[in-house]
Image (tube, rainbow, N blue to C red):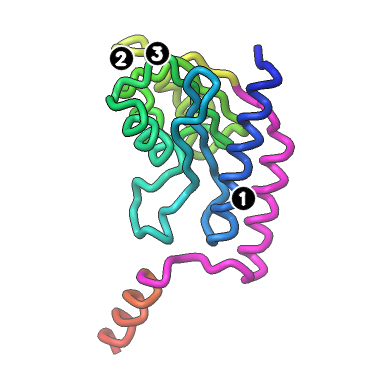
Amino acid sequence: MTTSNDEAFMRLAIEEAKCAFENGEIPVGAVAVYRGEIVGRGHNGKETQCDPTAHAEIIALREAARTQGGWRLLDVTLYCTLEPCPMCAGAMIQARLPRLIYALDDPKAGAAGSVIDLLHHPQLNHQVQVTRGLLSAQVQDLIGAFFCALREGTIPRYSEAWKHRRLAEKHESV
């Protein structure tokens, strides 16, 4: 069951996703909330930070842990625009996150039930309560617009550092 507060926080996660879009990143955003207050937020930064772990959820969880003063994020709800991948789901388990709300399933890498369900695995020491589908149409539109722009070439595919490295490798092989 979701509330109007859940919808308001998901809208903030969507704003984070729009920041990612503006930076040429896949538009995924996340907001961590403790007792009605935002304690962490993040958006994808893999390309701009040249960091494979710079997922929106990881960034929001790191900020929440710093804000809370510890790695156990008890009583924190994470709002994400996209179903978490296995890395992010693992971080949620490690943080003892009690609740995750996300907008859109990820049929290619989802780890909250679409491809695999790490968040409810019976052999792990913690399970996360999951609510899916909140404001999914808005997120689907945003992600669709991103990939359309990517196909049209109005968004660069890779970070500048990656492009320079690939270009140098091409010249070395000639």
Over which residues does the magenta segment extend?
132-161
Q: Which mark is residue 68?
A: none
Amino acid type, callout 1? Lys
Q: Are marks 2 and 3 in contact (CB under 8 Å)?
A: yes
The image shows residue 157 at horizontal and vertical percentages of 51, 65
Circle nearer the viewer, 2 or 3: 3
Does the magenta portion include 9? no
> Is 125 placed left or right of 74 in the picture?
left
Residue drawn at 45 percent across, 26 percent down: 116
Amino acid type, callout 2? Leu
Q: Which mark is residue 124?
A: 2
Q: Please state which of residues 136 and 95 is positioned toward the viewer in this rendering.
A: 95
The residue at which mark 1 appears reads as: 18
The image shows residue 165 at horizontal and vertical percentages of 32, 75
Q: Are marks 1 and 3 in contact (CB under 8 Å)?
A: no
Circle nearer the viewer, 1 or 2: 1
Label 2: state its secondary structure: loop
Q: Main secondary structure of the magenta part?
A: helix
The residue at which mark 3 appears reads as: 127
Instruction: Name the quadrant of the N terminus.
Output: top right
> Is 28 placed left or right of 118 in the picture?
right
Circle nearer the viewer, 1 or 3: 1
How far is the residue under mark 2 from the one under mark 3? 7 Å
Disc 1 crowd rating (10 Å Cα; few below 14, some 14-19, many 20+) is many
How far is the residue under mark 1 from the one under mark 2? 34 Å
